[in-house]
Image (cartoon, helix red, strand yellow):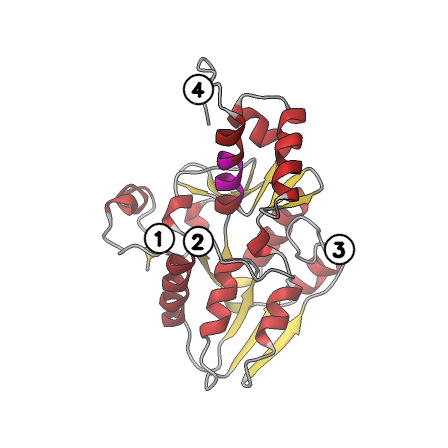
Amino acid sequence: MNNDNELVNYTKEERKNLILKEINLHTRVSFETLSVKLCVSEDTVRRDINELESESLLIKVKGGAMTKAYHHSSSNQTYAGESKQTIAQKTLGLLHDGMVLLIGGGTTIREFIRLIPDTLNLTIFTVTVLSAVELLDKPNVKIIMIGGSISSYSQMCVSGDVYNQLANIKVDLLILGTNALDIEGGFSDSDWETVQVKKAMIQASEKTAILTISEKLDTVLKMKIANLSEVDYVVTEVDPDHEKLQAYKKAVPSLVFI
């Protein structure tokens, strides 16, 4: 976030590049957030996003924009794809035969699903239609879709039925992606309905693993989902002894980095 006393005059090309970086990093970003970060009006942000959409570089959604890689029709290369593949491979180490999982959605979760061995027997609950579709290719995975109305923001089911269904299960492990992670800010998001469902997902799980590229560390969005003390594992592409993680280990000794 820019310092309140420091106004930066970006060129249009610089603004557009920064918009793309923020959207690729956080998956979805609101007009308001981009307006503050770029020190311009929301109307200016909307015009830039309209141009970026016309260039097929992002997708406009209500209140903001999202990365093309997250869209159901996407064949685009995933942002930080190699890092996300590394995270997915590491996450497999948390699995064992016969586990019951609850998973969210997103590009890192997609990479994780693709790497699940065909021989592994799992039961997987999900609130995300795209994750359920990806899982159909796994012959020994029983898929249970927790359904309801679907959020255009997060592509997750977010209605009252979802809360009722989540309240009646207790899974071995929750695997979630995140848009932001911070020592003080915990893990956070920008959409109220999505935050509430993710809170309910944590309550429905014995343990929680958050998957994130290290670039998302030390970033905070508007609404906290949980403190890091409520999380058991954080899986990044960097080594667990990497300097980026040392402050987190000191602040939350119970947190295991993989």
Residue 91 is left or right of residue 66, and the answer is left
Q: Which residues are magenta?
A: 17-23
**C-alpha gap between disc 4 and disc 1:** 31 Å
Comes first in the chain, label 3 or label 4: 4
Residue found 42% across the figure and 48% down from its top: 229
Q: How many marks?
A: 4
Mark closer to the observer (3, 4): 4
Which residue carries the number 3 mark? Answer: 160
Which residue carries the number 1 mark? Answer: 255
Q: Identify the disc placed on residue 3.
A: 4
Check disc 4 and give the amino acid type. Answer: Asn
Helix, strand or loop at label 2? It is: loop
Q: Main SS type for the magenta part?
A: helix
**Front residue of this view, candidates 38 and 101:** 38
Mark closer to the observer (4, 1): 4
Residue found 47% across the figure and 16% down from its top: 7
